[in-house]
Amino acid sequence: MITEITHVEDGEKKLIQSAYRQLLRSIKSEMDETDQKNIRRAYELAVEAHASQRRKSGEPYILHPIAVARICAEEIGLGPTAIVAALLHDVVEDTDITLTDIQKQFGVQIAKMVDGLTKLDGAYNSESPQAENFKKVLSTLVEDVRIVLIKMADRLHNMRTLGSMPPHKQLKIAAETSYIYAPLAHRLGLYAFRTEFLDLCMKITDPEDYQAIAKKLQETKRSREDYIQSFIAPLKKQLDEMDVKYRIFGRAKSIYSIWNKLKNKSVSFDEIYDLFAVRIILNVPPKKEKLFCWQAYSIVTDVHRPITERLKDWITTPKANGYESLHTTVVGSQGRFVEVQIRTERMDEIAERGFAAHWKYKGVNNADDVFERWLDSVREILEDPEGSPVEFLDSFKANSLFNEEVYIYTPKGDLRVLPKGATALDFAFSIHSDVGYHCTAIKIDNQIVPMGRMLKNGDRVEIITNNSQKPSEDWLKLVTTGKAKAKIRSAMKEERRHKGELGKEALGRKFKNLRLQAYEEAIELLVRHYRLNSHVDLYFAIAMNTLTIPEIFKKFHVEHGRLKLIETLKPVETKKEEPVRRPRALPPVPRLMINGEPGEQYDYALATCCNPVLGDNIFAYLTANAGLKIHRINCPNAANLMVNYGYRIMKADWSSTVTQTNFVTRLKITGIDDGPGVIERLTHQLSLMGLNIRSLNIAGTEGFFEADLSLVVSNTDQLNQASRALKNLSNISTVTRIE
C-alpha cells in the first residue's frame, strides 16, 4: 500500500506531528522516562524510515503506523512497549532498517515483537504464502499476545482506509478479515473490533444490502431512540433504589448482525424488532458483582415481562474468551422484544478490550484463567509437526476461533469447554493424548455411545481405555478438534514410520548392491517421481508392496553412483499452474474479462457452489487441474479460497459484449400451504414472466411449505424481478437465493 515520494511538505509535517500528539494523548498507561524516550525514538525512526513512502490514498505512509499505535493505546489499552512495536511494525518489511538495528536501539523484546509483525519473504516457497504468514503471526500468540493485538489494530486501520485500493484487492483483504481476523477478535474478546470488521467486510462484499440497512437504520433512528427512552424510564426509578452507581443506555445492533438475522430468519427489515439492545452497567466491588447483577435482573423482569428461555447466564459460567454478562429478552410496550444486557464496569471493560483488559483483572474472583486454557489449545495445534500451513489455518479457525462452545463434565464433575460440534472422541483427546489413543468405549450419562456422538451442554462423559488400543485412520472422521486430528495423524504417521522401516531397509540394501553414493538425492528423486509426500510414505509404500523394488528399477538405474531416470521412460512433467487455453469443442459460456483481458483464451466454467448470474460481482479461481472456476464474491467458499490460495485468484468481470446467455440459479421459497393451488400459483407467476423452471422440489406440513426452485434467468435484474413477483403472492412468506 505504499509508493515512493521525494519530499514532505510543511502542511504534511504539521499533519504528522498532530497525529503523533493525538497518539500521546491517547496513552492511558503509566510511563516512566525510559518509556517516553523509547516512544519518541521509535516515532523519529519510523518518520525517517518511511519518509519516502506514501499510501495508495496519497497520504504520507507514516500516518499508518501512528494510527495503529493509537488504536493499540486507545481502543485496546496496550502499554508503551506495544506502542513502540506498533510504530515500528512496518520498518523492517518496507524499509532498509533491519531487526539488528531495532535490537540495538530498543532491545530484544521489541525486536522480537517487530519480527513477529514482519511478513515472510515473498519468495518463500510454500503451497500458500498467505497461510504461512498467518501461521507466523498466530504462532506468536503463545509467546507474546501483544503481537497479535498489534496485528489486529494494523488490520483495523487498513480496513478503515481500504477505499483507495483496487476493488479486487479490497475483496481479498475483506476475505482475510472475515475468515481470520473477525473470529480472532471474538476469541480475544475484542467485540468492538469484531463488529467493525464484519460491517466493513459486508460494505465490500454486499454493498447494496449494507447501504439498504444503513439507510433504514437512519430513517428509524428517531423513533428507535424515543422507544429506548420510554423503555428505560421505569427501570431507572427502581435501579436508583439499589443505591449503586450505574449506567443504562440503548445501542443499535450492527449492520452485519441485522443482515445476518434477515438472512437466517428470512424476514424483512420491518419484521425485526430487536434492532437494538439495552445495556445496564453497574459500578460495584468485584465480590458483590453477582449479587447486584442478579438484583438488576430482578428489577428488569419485574418491570417488563421476561421470555425465560432466552436468559443467558455468562456470569456463573463465562464464555471461553472471558466474556461475562447476563443477557435476557423481555417484552416491552407494543409487544416488541428487547434484549437487556447486565454487567459490571469490570465485565464491560473485558468485553470491550478483551485480552488486554482481562490481564488487568487477572485473579479477580479466583476465576479459572480462560485465556490460559485457550492458549494451551493453541499450543497443541502448533505442536502438530505434520500439518501444512493450510491445515494449520483450517484447524486454528475451526478449533481456536469457534464462536460457540459446549460445557462438558468429567465423572468427577470437572468442567471442560470444547467447540460446538465436538464429539465424544474429541473429549477423550482433550483429557490427555494417551486417553484418546487408548480409548475403547465412551459413556455419556452412564450409557455407551458411539465415539462420533456429538456432545451437548451438560453431558457427563466417561472414557474407557485399554492399553492395547491404537488409533485408526477412520478415527479422523469421528473428531472435529485440531488437537484430536493432530494427535491421530501423528499416531498414524508413527505407525507408518514403524512399518516403513522394512521398506527403508530393503531400499537401502538395493542401493548398497548398486553402489549408489548419493542416497538422500536418490530418495528425493523417487518421492518426487511417484508424487509422494515424504520419505516415510515411500518406505511405507515399499513395505506394503504398493510399490516394489523391481518396479522402481524398471524406470531407474544407477549411473556414476547416482540414481537416474531411464530416458526412454520420461516422467510426466508437472506443468506450471497457469490458465489453460479453451478447447474449441466446449459449449458456449458467457464472455468474461480475466485480469482485464478478453477471457476467450482461457478454459473457465461457472462454479456450481454459488451459480453466478450475469450482473453478480465475480472472481476467477485457478484450480489445480480444471482450469478457471468463476465464483460470486459472496460465495460461501470465497473467503477460504482467497485466504489460503490468494495467488490463484484472478480478477474477473462480465464482458460488455456478453451475448444472451442463460444461467441456472436456485431460490428457497416458504409460505402458507393453503391447498393444491400452491404449485399452480408459483408456476403461473413465472410463466407470465417467460421464465423456465429447471426443477421444483416442494414439501408441505402443518400448514407450512418449503420449496427449492431451480430457475433459468438471463441476469440478476431478471432474477430480482422474479423474486419480487413471487414474494408479492398472497401465500408467500420468504423468497431467498440459495448460495
Image: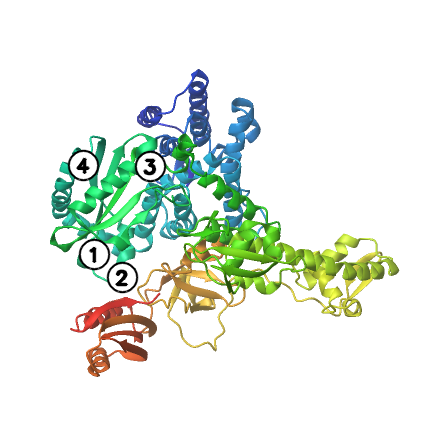
Question: Whole-percent x and y of residue 497?
Answer: 71, 57
Which of disc 1 and disc 2 is earlier in sequence? 2
CB contact under 8 Å: marks 1 and 3: no
Q: Nearest to the eye among marks 1 and 3: give it.
A: 3
Q: Say what amino acid the circle numbered 1 marks.
A: Ile
Question: Whole-percent x and y of residue 167?
Answer: 36, 51
| Distance between mark 1 and mark 3 Cα atoms | 28 Å
Q: Say what amino acid the circle numbered 4 marks.
A: Leu
| Distance between mark 2 and mark 3 Cα atoms | 31 Å
Crowding near the residue tagged with mark 2, few <14, some 14–19, many ≥20 C-alpha atoms within 10 Å: few
Q: Foreground: 237 or 13? A: 237
Specify the label residue 239 is tagged with. Answer: 4
Specify the label residue 272 is tagged with. Answer: 1
In percent of the image, x 30 and y 75: which residue is there? 711
Q: Is residue 161 visible?
A: no
| Distance between mark 2 and mark 4 Cα atoms | 35 Å
Question: Whole-percent x and y of residue 509?
Answer: 85, 60
Specify the label residue 3 is tagged with. Answer: none
Left or right, 566 with respect to 33, comes to: right
Q: Secondary structure at mark 2?
A: helix
CB contact under 8 Å: marks 2 and 1: yes
Crowding near the residue tagged with mark 1, few <14, some 14–19, many ≥20 C-alpha atoms within 10 Å: some
Which residue matches tag 2? 265
Q: Say what amino acid the circle numbered 2 marks.
A: Lys
Q: Foreground: 42 or 56? A: 42
| Distance between mark 1 and mark 4 Cα atoms | 28 Å
Q: Nearest to the eye among marks 2 and 3: give it.
A: 3
**Where 547 falls versus 487 (above or below)?**
below
**Where 370 falls versus 268 (above or below)?**
above
Left or right, 483 with respect to 566, comes to: left
Left or right, 298 with respect to 351, comes to: left
Which of disc 3 and disc 1 is earlier in sequence? 1
